[in-house]
Amino acid sequence: MDHLDSRAAEGVSLAGAGHWVEAAKACAEVVAGGRSDYRIHSLYGSVLMRCGRYEDARDQLGVALLYSPESIEVRNNLAATQLKLGEPCLTEETCRAILAECPDYLPAWANLGLALCHQGRVPEGLEAMQRAIELSPDDPILRDNLLLNLNYIATDGQDLAFVHEALCGDLGRSPKKPLPNTGSRRIRIGYVSNDFKSHSVSFFIAGVIRAHSRSAFEVFCYSTTPAPDRRTENFRELADHFVDLSNCSDVEAAQRVEADQIDILVDLGGHTSGNRLGIFALRPAPVQVSYLGYPATTGCSFIDYRVVDALTDPEENSSFSTERLVRLTPPFLAYLPHSTFPATAQLPALANGYLTFGSFNHSSKISDDTLELWSMVLTKVPDSRLFLKARAFSDAKVCDGYRERFSQRGIDGARLSFSGFTEGTQEHLAAYGKIDIALDTFPYNGTTTTCEALWMGVPVITLVGNLHAARVGYTLLTSVGLGDLAATSAADYVALAATFPEDLNHLANLRRSLQRIVASSALCDPSRLTLELETAYRKMLEDHV
């Protein structure tokens, strides 16, 4: 066996063990050495996907298809890559072609479901996901995809909780662990996340980890991301202990947590992509908590508590959660703005002569309810425009689909403009300079997008619903003194939007002062939040039985 054969075999072995970065290096060396065949390009493409290098993955998968154009596996991997690159219509097309040949090919059903959701066609997407689950009822990734995307259209808390508990209630069978005899040592907190990287969750947990009292708490970050980046290195510095669990099985990871004698283990992902709830199912810590990354109950019996606040989850909503709710003083999170950001732009309406509404929320959140709301706003403010920015709007067919959906509601497509993914943070934040007012989505509000809009001087109008996901905008706006922009009905939402053209000077003044207001508010005060969290953690340990 020559060197390239040896490295190719090593790439296969590394990929099989989940060492994606090392496997990518091995494949790169083989390809650079002149080896080119179906097997190496297919492997290289799939490994690059795992590393988050989607454009490179698409290139390699394309070469693999030159050798084997009919390969269903490679075509499906290409579909998944297209979705990550903001091309859900291409993903749909690829998946439907595969399913026409192999109607029971599960991965294509899964990718089709995601592609439809990314186009804002969530009910259709859920049907495809349900078909995938029928083919593989015990697949945790399929289950998580269904539950996460169900949040985009759910309005009944009892029904949502029922589905979560039905799918997850019997997952964990391990008994609760007793509290260790801690003596005088510090309380050990373990945060488990796939998002200790450049991800929205990182902007809400970094301040907490930094603010923890090191005299009373010892902080462990258990990272499960296979694609660390510069922000990951920041978390290495923040935590007392940063532990990479990305290549560990659930059993191995649970053994490490248990060996570290963690008192409270906190899940930051829920049913989002890359979560490791399987670790929690093994009950490696006496107290286990859900916080921050998921907008509903996990439905899992092995999660004891869920941290929320009194606005997102009032007392009457307690039955919507299988966990015991711990309500903090609002807001239940603290936003850490980007370290560098562009200057707040002047109010666009002053130069344009009309008001521009906008939303930078994920396209899956633009539900039929949201389209109805926004169409009513555009009808009520006839000279206004709407600017939408999301990764899926890189796909021209997705934009055309939304124009048609607005047209069905009497809105001329010429009043709409779209922007897809922008690579740099500065460019992304600068895009807020194109809108005067942000319109929140419903029933799944924005979180990071709302914080970014407020930071860049753009007020946000939200509609308050019954569920946590539909009340996050309420707690965020209240925390910065803009609770009057949280509407309690569709009519109030539209009426609020219609008041802004009447006094553009007021809106311009608010734009200039909003960043200062946000910076001094509870929304950007991780010290306050962390003190409350620590009090809550102590109470959890006291109540442990």
Image (spheres, grey):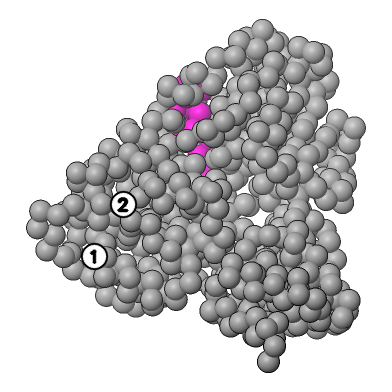
Is residue 477 part of the magenta span, yes or no? yes
Q: Which residue matches tag 1?
A: 261
Judge whether residue 277 can be spotted in this image. Answer: no
Q: Residues within 10 Å of mark 1 (few under 14, many from 20)?
A: some
Q: Residue at x 89, y 36 (%)?
A: 413
Furthest residue in direction front, as rendered: 2
Please tell me whether mark 2 sits on a helix, a strand or a loop. Answer: loop
Is residue 77 part of the magenta span, yes or no? no
Q: Is residue 259 left or right of residue 507?
A: left
Q: Residues within 10 Å of mark 2 (few under 14, many from 20)?
A: some
Res. 313 mark = none
Q: At which x and y percent is residue 374?
A: 73, 34
Image quadrant where one finds the C terminus: bottom left
Q: At which x and y percent is residue 137?
A: 58, 79
Q: Main secondary structure of the magenta part?
A: helix
Please tell me whether mark 1 sits on a helix, a strand or a loop. Answer: loop
Image quadrant where one finds the N terminus: bottom right
Depth check, mark 1 against mark 2: the one in front is 2
Q: Residue at x 69, y 72 (%)?
A: 29
Of residues 128 and 288, the one drawn nearer to the viewer in this rendering: 288
Image quarter for residue 62?
bottom right
Q: At which x and y percent is residue 81?
A: 74, 63
Residues at marks 1 and 2, CA–CA distance in whole angstroms: 14 Å
Q: Residue at x 24, y 44 (%)?
A: 214
| Dot 1 amino acid type | Gln
Q: Is residue 384 left or right of residue 164?
A: right
Of pointers 1 and 2, the one earlier in the residue sequence: 2
Image quarter for residue 253?
bottom left
Q: Residue at x 87, y 48 (%)?
A: 396
Region of the chain picked out in magenta, as a range? 469-482
Q: Which residue matches tag 2?
A: 240
Judge whether residue 513 can be spotted in this image. Answer: yes
